[in-house]
Image (cartoon, rainbow, N blue to C red):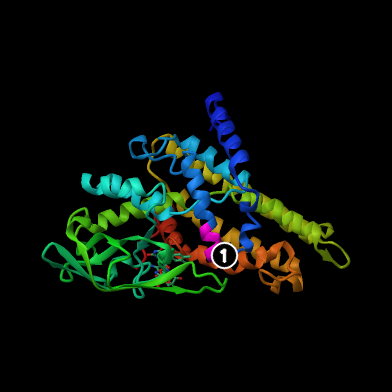
Amino acid sequence: MDFNYSPTEEKFRQEVRLWLDVNLPEDLREGRDEELAQDERWERHKTWHKKLYEGGWVGIWWPKEYGGRGASVIEQVIFSEELARSDAPAGVNMNGITLLGPTLMHWGTEEQKNRFLPKILPAEEIWCQGYSEPGSGSDLASLQTRAVEDGDSFVVNGQKVWTSQAQYSDWCFLLVRTDPSAPKHQGISYLLVDMHSPGVTVRPLVQITGDAEFNEVFFEDVRVPKKNLVGELNRGWMVAITTLMFERVATGGYFRFEKTLPQLIALARHVELDGRPAIEDTSVRQQLAQFAIEVGAVKYNELRRLTRRLKGQPPGPEGSLAKIITTELNFRIANFAMELLGPYAILEKGSPFAIDHARWSHRMLGARAGTIAAGTNEIQRGIIGERVLGLPKGR
Ligand SMILES: Cc1cc2nc3c(=O)[nH]c(=O)nc-3n(C[C@H](O)[C@H](O)[C@H](O)COP(=O)(O)OP(=O)(O)OC[C@H]3O[C@@H](n4cnc5c(N)ncnc54)[C@H](O)[C@@H]3O)c2cc1C
């Protein structure tokens, strides 16, 4: 493994860094941004997204023919590192950019590609992912939302849940059952549904953080043109898996931890324990050192994953490892911050006495969600058990 960057890659890094230094508004840097109410945060991220887009920095790994830069894997890593270094938010429409876009490039008809791809990077159309249902999460293939053919349309009835950003979305890539008599993986189709169609109702679900990151979405006799079917009728499971593969590749990442750790250390310097800065306490120092070791381990696991990609090898179990380790480390760091804060931990955003704008309690309350989203950690452990340890398949 070679840890050095080539002169061309270093030049690219300088280009990104310079652009961010000039263009990133001070008030968008993380920490201040976390203080805002959700809708305001969304609007500001959208504005930032437009700026990133105009600078040519959205979806840099998309092929040039679809508006990307055709950036190499290493350039993507450099770009992510620089975004994290400058505390820049990532922008919006991640469901469109990282999931639906690449899926359509692979499975879409020319007409679908021409219609939908150009509006994804500029976030002219925001996308959400309509997979999970009240009775179908980990066992996704058991989904019950029905689509029945009627002339040149499908008529969709059913309910999705946990649909992130549905309240802001214009379109949804939706899994529906089109053949209830077939074995469960074989009767599913993949539709592109206009969220502004009659019969679509979105109800935000407020989480313990106070944000409504996700929603319930109801479909009542919603008509979807047949030309919005991706892949073949009843063969949507293959398309759905393609999307999930992009989701697994996107999940994880160590860059944010390299920012979180110094923030945690700054907190330990700021708060007191027995009348002295908490950082002077031996057990606090040991815990901080332990986190530093684990962040290092996350980084090298990510680099191992990167090496596989650079060698053109298929994704290995490192993705499942990264998902478990990063989400659980994130949870433990947030909880340790709560211990450091003591009674200040209960103060919420907006309180004049809150330390660090109450970002730690917001993070602690939100951290559990990461262990569930994009395939629960129990499911990831199952994957590791089977593929790495060679254990018998679970039931
Ligand atoms: C923040 C967040 C955002 C999300 N965004 C979206 C979105 O945009 N679109 C979307 O479609 N979905 C979204 N989801 C839903 C997510 O994909 C599901 O929550 C997840 O797949 C788990 O499904 P479930 O909640 O139905 O839990 P279940 O599958 O019912 O699982 C319940 C519990 O049983 C465990 N379990 C289930 N099966 C097994 C097994 N075989 N082995 C061991 N343990 C098992 C699980 O780990 C879990 O602890 C989001 C979830 C979160 C938390």
Give residue 193's quadrant in the image: bottom left
Q: Is residue 102 left or right of residue 11?
A: left
Residue 6: x %, y % from top left: 54, 26
Q: Which residues are magenta?
A: 37-43
Near-viewer residue (196 or 89): 196
Give residue 83's quadrant in the image: top right
Q: Is residue 84 above or below residue 240?
A: above
Label 1, on which residue?
Answer: 367
Near-viewer residue (91 or 383): 91
Near-viewer residue (295 or 100): 100
Dominant secondary structure (helix, strand or loop) of the stretch shown in magenta: helix
Q: Is residue 168 left or right of residue 278?
A: left
Res 5 visible: no
Q: Is residue 110 left or right of residue 86?
A: left
The quadrant where ligand 1 appears is bottom left
Residue 362: x %, y % from top left: 62, 67
- Seen at 30% across and 50% down, the residue is 116
Element type at marker 1?
helix
Which residue is at the far top? 7
